[in-house]
Amino acid sequence: MDFSWTKEQLAYKDKVVKFAQQHLNDSNIVERDQKSLFSKENWVKCATFGIQGLASTINYGGGEKDIDLLTATLAMEALGYGCKDNGLAFALNAQMWTVQQPISVFGSDFQKKKYLTPMAKGSLIASHGLTEEKAGSDVFGGMQLKAEKVDGGYLLNGKKRYITLGPIADIALVFAVTNPDVGKWGISGFIVEKEYKGFESTENIPKMGMRTVPFGELIFKDCFVPEENRLGNEGAGLGITIASLEYDRCCILASQLGAMERQLEESIAYAKQRKQFDQSIGKFQSVSNRIADMKLRLETSRLLLYKVAWLKSSGESAMLEAAMLKLHLSESFVHSSIDSIRNHGGYGYVSENEVERNLRDAIGGLIYAGTSDIQRNIIANLLEL
């Protein structure tokens, strides 16, 4: 394993950090968090810079050359470090790795031409519809959305729940049961446009954290989807989802890693300048120990992240490593966010100072893209327990 970076990769990382710091940290982030407001302006800025293009090839809206997963991971880490809006980073990753990447790999030429370039350019926003009310951790065993084969396409009936970007998305990549007799092997993917008759999305669902990215339901009532909009073959839904989740966990967690590094630096700076009992609070062992733990979590998470990115970029399976990464990094972000609040005291508890928001945003990481409990089950199963 070689985790060293080229000069070009490191230069690009610095470029992403500077872009995020200069253009994405607007003064109304606290207000947008409190009012659950999504910034379409910042979304378009990211596209213009080339963020969404990281998940596309040159022919479909990518940059001057195809960027490998290692470089994309480094870039999303830089975005999480430079951008204080965790919801925006989460939303970008959700579209890029659960919609753009699957279409890039499994899509037809027609689908790639129609959808990938607009997504890379920021003019099209996409959501990924997998979770349902009775299908969360057991999403393939409990899926209720049905896709009935009819002349020229499929009729979709059912609902999807807790869908990132659902209320504002122009298209949705959704998964539905096409053959209930074969269980998880009878699930297929479909690209559904918001203008399709019988398809609607709900208003934003208020939530604890990640408030700047909207969540909602997708509702299908005899929604006709043309056959040309089925992604891959019938029954390919499980394979498509497993493939995309490894990329998704890698890059979403890369942005969290960047946020953890920023969080650590802010805690160190505060511990040095804040004085009590005639000395900086960093001199007190309880504070310095918490900061040492934050550093340890950051570096162990970084090693796991880079290993997963290296394995995927080498064409290797990373199911076990991705599960360990998802479990360790997401829980580390929560623990470090609590430590950060304790290090900042009352200052960190007040919303306007932007310390407590990381904790609210971090909690979601214990649930989305596979809960911590499920990651432990995956790890144990792969260890043949």
Image (cartoon, rainbow, N blue to C red):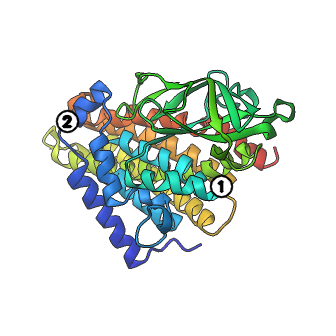
Kind of residue sitting beneath label 1: Phe
- Decide which of 355, 53 is in the foreground and name it: 53
The residue under the point 43% across, 29% down is 167
Q: Is residue 279 left or right of residue 98?
A: left
Is 182 or 11 nearer to us in this picture? 182
State whether residue 186 is above or below residue 319: above
Dot 2, how many residues are within 10 Å of its Cα: few (below 14), some (14-19), or many (20+)?
Answer: few
Q: Who's the residue at 58% across and 66% down the image?
A: 310
Q: Secondary structure at mark 1?
A: helix
Rendered location of residue 376, percent (x, y): 67, 40
Which residue is found at the position 49% from the left and 60% from the top?
Answer: 56
Alpha carbons under labels 2 and 1: distance apart: 39 Å
- Name the residue that disc number 2 marks: 28
Looking at the image, tell me whether mark 2 or mark 1 is earlier in sequence order.
Answer: 2
Q: Secondary structure at mark 2?
A: loop
- x and y, in percent, of residue 345 in the image: 26, 32
Residue 214 drawn above or below residue 27: above
